Amino acid sequence: MSRRKYSPEYKQEAVLLVKQSDVSISEVARSLGINDNMLSAGSKRLARRVRQRFPVMAIRETKS
């Protein structure tokens, strides 16, 4: 059995599903039929990119 490959767009949409909903990473991953570790890693990468590109927003998020 070979590893499935997902397009960057698919991964981005999956991460946005998590960020824009009240559903857990595990639940979103299960509903999409993907590994929750992949989705969790994608969420962390997105958060890191946002902090790097918009440091002011990251500061506001940590204060809330």
Image (cartoon, rainbow, N blue to C red):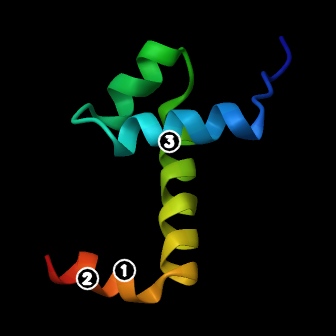
| Residue plotted at (43% across, 14% down) | 31
| Residue plotted at (48% across, 46% down) | 40
Q: Position of residue 59 (x, y in %)?
A: 31, 87
Q: Nearer the viewer, residue 49 or 56?
A: 56
| Amino acid type indicated by mark 2 | Arg
Q: Nearer the viewer, residue 52 or 1?
A: 52
Which badge, 2 or 3, is on the more N-terminal residue? 3
| Residue plotted at (57% across, 61% down) | 45
Left or right, 64 with respect to 48, comes to left
Kindly indicate whether the residue at mark 2 contacts the one at mark 1 (C-beta within 8 angstroms).
Answer: yes
Pointer 1 residue: 57
| Amino acid type indicated by mark 3 | Val
Pointer 3 residue: 15
Q: CA distance from mark 2 to mark 3?
A: 21 Å
Pointer 2 residue: 60
Q: Position of residue 2 (x, y in %)?
A: 86, 17
Q: CA distance from mark 3 to mark 1?
A: 19 Å
* Helix, strand or loop status at disc 1: helix
